[in-house]
Image (spheres, rainbow, N blue to C red):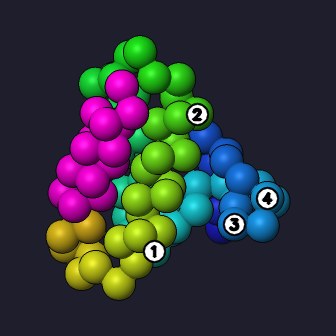
Amino acid sequence: MTAPLPLHPWPGPSGEDAGLAGTRSDGGTVPHAVARLAAEFPGHHVAVVSATVVRCRRELDGVPPGALPELLERLARERLRRSA
């Protein structure tokens, strides 16, 4: 079985393309948060929303998996509001 192709690639920590970093182990939390927040913040370019979500996901490393989707979206939403 082959792995699905990434929807929105962005650079990994060292600049290489990391695909949907962190999504295989957390059930697709990152791309779902990006999609919801991109719709909520149409004035922000999707690359900015993606970068914000990825940065927040890294900061939330170690959070219990069940709490991750809500915490990730809340943190990223607050960061995007502050940048508006």
Sequence order check: which comes first, mark 4 or mark 2?
4
Q: Is residue 57 left or right of residue 71?
A: right
Q: The disc labelled 1 sits on which kind of residue? A: Ser
Q: x%, y% of residue 9?
A: 67, 46
Which of these two is toward me, 81 or 14? 81
In the image, residue 55 sits, relative to residue 7, either above or below, namely below
Q: What is the crowding at mark 2: few (fewer than 14 residues within 10 Å), some, or many (at least 20)?
A: some
Of labels 1 and 4, the one closer to you = 4
For mark 4, what is the residue?
Answer: 15
Q: Is residue 50 left or right of residue 12?
A: left
For mark 3, what is the residue?
Answer: 13
Residue in view at x 39 percent, y 33 percent: 83
Q: x%, y% of residue 20?
A: 58, 55
Q: What is the crowding at mark 4: few (fewer than 14 residues within 10 Å), some, or many (at least 20)?
A: few
Q: How many angstroms separate mark 3 from mark 1 (CA)? A: 17 Å
Q: Is residue 42 magenta?
A: no
Residue in view at x 35 percent, y 71 percent: 60
Which of these two is toward me, 15 or 19? 15
Q: Which residues are magenta?
A: 69-84
Q: x%, y% of residue 36?
A: 31, 34
* Residue 25: mark in rendering: 1
